[in-house]
Image (cartoon, rainbow, N blue to C red):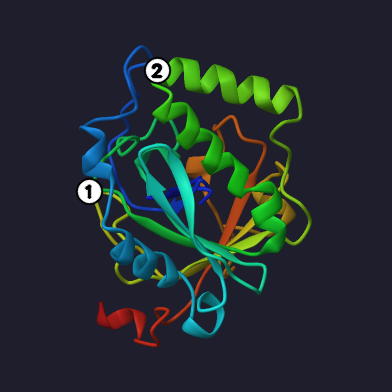
Amino acid sequence: MARATAFCSMALAVLVAAPAACAEPDSSPLKAPLEHYLMPANAEVALARSAAPPALSADATILVLSTHGYDVAAKGTNGFTCMVERGWAAPFDEVDFGNPKIRAPVCYNAQAVRTVLPYGIERTRLVLAGMTTAQMHAKIEKDVADKVLVPPEAGAMSYMMSKDQYLGDAGTHWHPHLMFHVARTGAAAWGANYDGSPIIIDTSHQDVPEPQTIFMMTVDHWSDGAGAHSH
């Protein structure tokens, strides 16, 4: 899943074959008790850092999920923020929306911290406030209309290079990849999904209420340097 609030993004951004399944609009996004979404803090810090190469993530701010939202577990110095996104960062109509097993490590650069990270923080806040899926969707649409949530800043990007990611039941791992977050646009603007093009558009995020399009580029190794073919 990549998915996100990749954001996914939100951040979450994977292209795996999975059956379409719409979330029940009047139900909670939580598909299990909240404790199933939580992790021991030390383990979550390590998993968050694994989203990007150690030379980058070692100096990043690290967020961890608690019962009241994301908390700062470590204050960084390089402008990046790493976190582990959960299943509610996925598009609302995906089968893994709300999946308690989702663990999607992502590291956002400073531009994305300012303009993309708020998407996932807001989704998390709404989930923990007890909103239904329909209420969440409506509130995010209002946030966008009110410019509380804005399009990604120029240069916004993120790393998803953890070989310990769990991105969906249909295929737990995708490829290590980079994500580029831009204001809504079509695939042709970046030559995405063209024959021979290394740029992929994340089609799963085309119908989410947040005002972004995600382009992706895969890389050949995980954040620890291991070849991607080895996992």
Task: Tell me the quadrant of the picture where the C terminus can be found.
Answer: bottom left
Quarter residue 215 falls in = bottom right
From the image, state whether disc 1 or disc 2 is nearer to you: 2
Q: Count the marks: how many?
A: 2
Nearest the viewer among 205 and 152 is 152
In this rendering, would 35 be left or right of 215? left
Determine the residue positioned at 65% across, 43% down: 212
Task: Give the Cα separation between the discs numbered 1 and 2.
Answer: 23 Å
The answer to whether residue 147 is left or right of residue 34 is: right
**Type of amino acid under label 2:** Thr
The residue that disc 1 covers is 169
Residue 85 seen in the current view: no
Q: Return the residue nearer the eye: 19 or 222.
A: 222
For label 2, count other residues whose C-alpha is less than 10 Å away and answer few (under 14), some (14-19) or many (20+). some
* Residue 16 point in image, percent of width and height: 34, 52
* Residue 182 in picture, x, y percent from top left: 70, 51
Examine the rendered structure and indicate whether residue 216 appears above or below residue 115: below
Question: Which residue lies under the disc numbered 2?
Answer: 132
- Residue plotted at (66% across, 56% down): 112
In the image, residue 187 lies at what x, y percent? 65, 50
Seen in the image, is 222 located left or right of residue 37?
A: right
Residue 187: mark in rendering: none
Does label 1 or label 2 sit earlier along the sequence?
2
Amino acid under label 1?
A: Asp
Which residue is painted at 60% across and 51% down in the image?
A: 214
Query: Considering only vertical position in the picture, is 118 above or below 181?
Result: above
Disc 2 secondary structure class: loop
